Amino acid sequence: MPAALTSSPVGEGRSSARTLAGLLEQLGDIPLRRVRIQPPLGTATEQDLINADPHEDGLCELVDGVLVEKAMGLRESLLAAALLALLRGFVDPPNLGLVTGAGGTFGLFPGLVRIPDVAFISWARIPGGRVPAEPIPQIAPDLAVEVLSEGNTPKEMERKRREYFAAGVRLVWMIDPEHRTVTIFTGPDQSTTLDTTQTLEGGDVLPGFHVALTTLFAELDRQGPQGT
């Protein structure tokens, strides 16, 4: 089980930026449209995140005292749902742990809540070996999956990776629908990129799990019956 999550590798749970431009840079050069201004910038808490209306504010993460809307899209959701189904089909029969999808919150550090598009948490990481009752459990998953959207930036995703691994995540998959690749990270700067001629495997985190990427990305090419 990972060490207790006591401090963020990036900040202390509050923004140190003095200007809006500085805040956007600190958050990873993200578009301004993804930053919620209520509660006031730098003051948001986990309770504010819990109280946020996803229909009005979008699905948000808590970063440096700011509610940051996740970048989303239909293609990204489709790929995440397909991968989630494959992972559950592998994880559930032997009862290896839990697989979460959109809306699955993780309190990585005080003041830092991330929502991977898909995640796997082994029972060994879950206190008491039961589904957590709290809306934002203070645990880190074994595997975190991010499906890249148009609104994501390279700097934002680099920051996320560093936070994930600092919190104890063992494996990160970054799925790129545009280029149909998956980059496997076993550390913040240790990666391998696979294309549709290759197979995605679970490594030491989920030994035995594998899926041909041509099969996964074929979800993007589905069509209805001819003539409909």
Image (cartoon, rainbow, N blue to C red):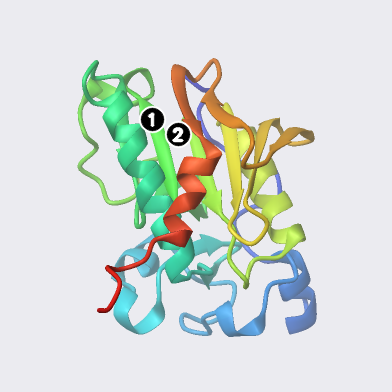
Foreground residue, 227 or 85?
Answer: 227
Identify the residue position indicated by label 2 in the image. Answer: 141
Identify the residue position indicated by label 1 in the image. Answer: 121
Circles 2, 1 touching at the beta carbon (< 8 Å): yes
Q: Is residue 30 left or right of residue 34?
A: right
- Cα distance between the residues tagged 2 and 1: 5 Å
In the picture shown, does residue 221 fall above or below 135? Answer: below
Please tell me whether mark 1 sits on a helix, a strand or a loop: strand
| Residue at 20%, 42% in the rendered image | 133
Residue kind at label 1, given as amino acid type: Ile
Q: Quadrant of residue 130?
A: top left
| Residue at 23%, 19% in the rendered image | 95
Residue 83 in picture, x, y percent from top left: 40, 43
Q: Is residue 189 left or right of residue 219?
A: right
Q: Residues within 10 Å of mark 2 (few under 14, many from 20)?
A: many
Please tell me whether mark 2 sits on a helix, a strand or a loop: loop
Residue kind at label 2, given as amino acid type: Pro
| Residue at 50%, 62% in the rendered image | 62
